[in-house]
Image (cartoon, helix red, strand yellow):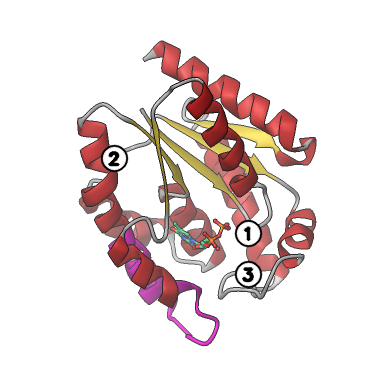
Amino acid sequence: MFITLEGSEGAGKSTLIEHLKKYFLKRNIDFIFTKEPGGTDEGIEFRKILLDNNIELDPLSETFLLLADRIEHVRKIINPALELNKNVLSDRYLDSTYAYQGAGRKINKDKLDKLIKPLKFPEPDLTIYLDLPVEEGLKRAKGRDSLDRFEKEEIDFFKRIRDSYLKLAEENPSRIFTIDSANGENEVFESAKDCIEKKLNES
Ligand code: TYD
């Protein structure tokens, strides 16, 4: 089972992951938790460049770095785990590229498709999208330490990203499950856990 978790800044992905890790450990359900960018040793190097505030990147260079990160991640972590029938949960994956580079950086969808489709990345069985109004998310994110290369973008960038996620969810109702992140961490966890367990029982 391949599950991905999506959401924009401050939506509560990290908190949800901590809850899910504890829950699956307690229930003895084996899950590999991983993330993008930076799910492999090589990816950690790509991630440093991608998040570095002092580096200015063309949107296409940014996209190529993210795709290089994903190629390594899929080849070294995701595919080997799926081949062994293991459960994988990735913090961000393909939808992030359509939301951030597509809508956020304004790379046309056909162009992105042409870059991405030939790479034959596996499709997630389930994607959990944590939705939160942009102002609320940025308020939460800005309470943290220094801002990275994405977090320092202006508010319209994040509004385009949220609209894009909502559109992706509307277009892929059987794959993407949306959770209202304003509900508070316990409710968000309960919804995510129920949705994942239902999917595990179906498979
Ligand atoms: P990270 O610190 O992991 O942030 P978050 O907690 O929000 O997941 O930083 C990852 C950043 O990379 C995040 O701002 C979104 C961005 N990103 C893209 O722009 N495109 C992508 O395809 C991926 C995977 C991530």
Return the residue at label 2: 122
Q: Identity of the amino acid at label 1?
A: Arg
Q: Earlier in the sequence, mark 1 or mark 3?
A: 3
Q: Position of residue 66 (x, y in %)?
A: 37, 64
Circle 1 or circle 3, nearest the eye: 3
Return the residue at label 3: 151
Q: Is residue 124 visible?
A: yes
Q: Position of residue 65 (x, y in %)?
A: 34, 69
Q: CA distance from mark 1 to mark 2?
A: 26 Å
Q: How many numbered marks does the figure carry? A: 3
Q: Is mark 3 within 8 Å of ligand 1?
A: yes
Q: Is residue 114 visible?
A: no
Q: Earlier in the sequence, mark 1 or mark 2?
A: 2
Q: Main secondary structure of the magenta part?
A: helix
Residue at the spot 79% in from the left edge and 61% down from the top edge:
139
Q: CA distance from mark 3 to mark 2?
A: 28 Å
Q: Position of residue 97 (x, y in %)?
A: 44, 57
Q: Identity of the amino acid at label 2?
A: Pro
Q: Earlier in the sequence, mark 3 or mark 2?
A: 2
Q: Quadrant of the C terminus?
A: top left
Label 3 secondary element: loop
Q: Is residue 55 left or right of residue 125?
A: right
Label 1 secondary element: helix
Label 2 secondary element: loop
Q: CA distance from mark 1 to mark 3?
A: 14 Å
Q: Is residue 153 left or right of residue 118?
A: right
Return the residue at label 1: 160
Q: Is residue 56 left or right of residue 146?
A: left
Instruction: Please state the extent of the stretch shown in magenta in the rendering.
Output: 50-69
Q: Quadrant of residue 123?
A: top left
